[in-house]
Image (spheres, rainbow, N blue to C red):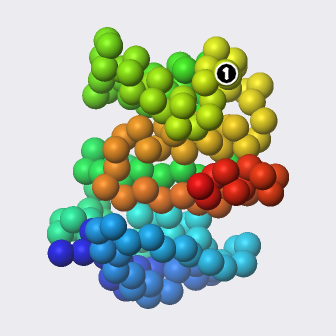
Amino acid sequence: MALLQLRDLNKHFGGLHVTNSVNLVLEQGEIHCLIGPNGAGKSTLFRLILGEHHPGSGQIWFADEDITALKSFARIRRGLSVKFQVPGVFKGLSVRQNLEIALQSRLHGAALDKEIEGLLAFLNLEAEQAQLAGNLSHGQKQWLEIGMAISLKPRLLLLDEPTAGMSPEETHMTGE
């Protein structure tokens, strides 16, 4: 059973054909990179998979279930998680509060605190945990959003240009 299958996925915006009969199979545990120039439709494909856009035709299967008609929240509950190119952190909240929001639906009390501490260490953001997320460097915002995405313990994690705008050192650290 494939984790994700895209079957003849098509999306048009007016006269622009963004995805053209896309077929893709991802198996559990595989790592893939989607490479293409700006405007090629990579982010649109991620938005189709997440359910933010609806295909004109075709199907999206996740873990042997047709999720084409499901809303984004239902797809997330089934184990999808996405980090988009532009960081979507809560700028007016602290780093710690951002992680708490991501985790609060499944953890509470000491278990929540323990998971946050582990994520802060993993993301190398322990010293910044009380800082407003809006005051972080661009790379740190990217890391925070990656942390929020992985905190869901997804079966499939999609990262849309996770190192965009990062320094070479931040890019290397992200890869590690």
> Residue 164 lies in what quarter of the image?
bottom right
Relative image position of residue 74 (x, y in whole percent):
28, 47
What residue is pinned by disc 1?
127
The reply to whether residue 59 is visible in this rendering is no
Above or below for 167 versus 126:
below
Residue drawn at 63 percent across, 52 percent down = 174
Q: Is residue 107 left or right of residue 90?
A: left
Residue drawn at 40 percent across, 17 percent down = 113
Above or below for 85 versus 30:
above
Q: Give whichever of 46, 153 is nearer the camera.
A: 153
Relative image position of residue 168 (x, y in whole percent):
80, 57
Residue drawn at 21 percent across, 65 percent down = 63
Q: Give whichever of 87, 121 is nearer the camera.
A: 121
The reply to whether residue 29 is visible in this rendering is yes
Circle 1: residue type: Ala
Residue positioned most to the top: 109
Q: Give whichever of 13, 158 is nearer the camera.
A: 158
Q: Secondary structure at mark 1?
A: helix
Residue positioned most to the right: 167
**What is the number of callouts on the image?**
1
Image quadrant holding the N terminus, namely bottom left
Relative image position of residue 9 (x, y in whole percent):
40, 79
> Residue 57 lies in what quarter of the image?
bottom left
Q: Is residue 85 left or right of residue 150?
A: right
Image quadrant holding the C terminus, namely bottom right
Residue drawn at 67 percent across, 51 percent down = 173
Above or below for 116 versus 34:
above
